[in-house]
Amino acid sequence: MAITTECPSCEENISLHGKLELGKKIRCPHCDADLEVVGLSPVELDWADYDDWDDEWDDDDEDDDDDDDW
């Protein structure tokens, strides 16, 4: 069952799937903001604390292309 909540950065709706836990890291599919679940009832997202960011985020649309030409 998907739960829908709003991204605090771009204000677009995000569908969250699977088990939600406080502290779960996700990435907004609309604006790529790094977010964290900070509330469960209702589900609330906030910007992730980078000190605790351990590549534990969920991002179904992650682009692993490292061919940046800069």
Image (cartoon, helix red, strand yellow):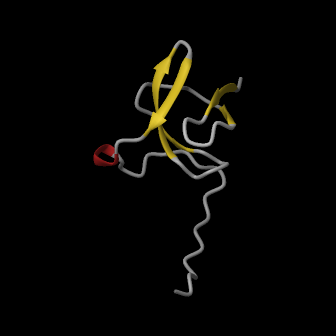
* Residue 56 as seen in the image, left or right of residue 27: left
Determine the residue positioned at 61% across, 30% down.
18
Q: Position of residue 24 (x, y in %)?
A: 45, 34
Residue farthest top in this picture:
41
Q: Position of residue 29 (x, y in %)?
A: 65, 48
Q: Is residue 63 above or below residue 23?
A: below
Q: Is residue 62 above or below residue 46?
A: below
Front position in the image: 20 or 52:
52
Residue 19, by quadrant, is top right
Residue farthest bottom in this picture:
69
Determine the residue positioned at 60% across, 45% down.
28
* Image quadrant containing the N terminus: top right
Determine the residue positioned at 31% across, 44% down.
52
Residue 42, by quadrant, is top right
Q: Position of residue 30 (x, y in %)?
A: 67, 48
* Residue 22 as seen in the image, left or right of residue 52: right
Residue farthest left in this picture:
51
Determine the residue positioned at 41% across, 41% down.
48
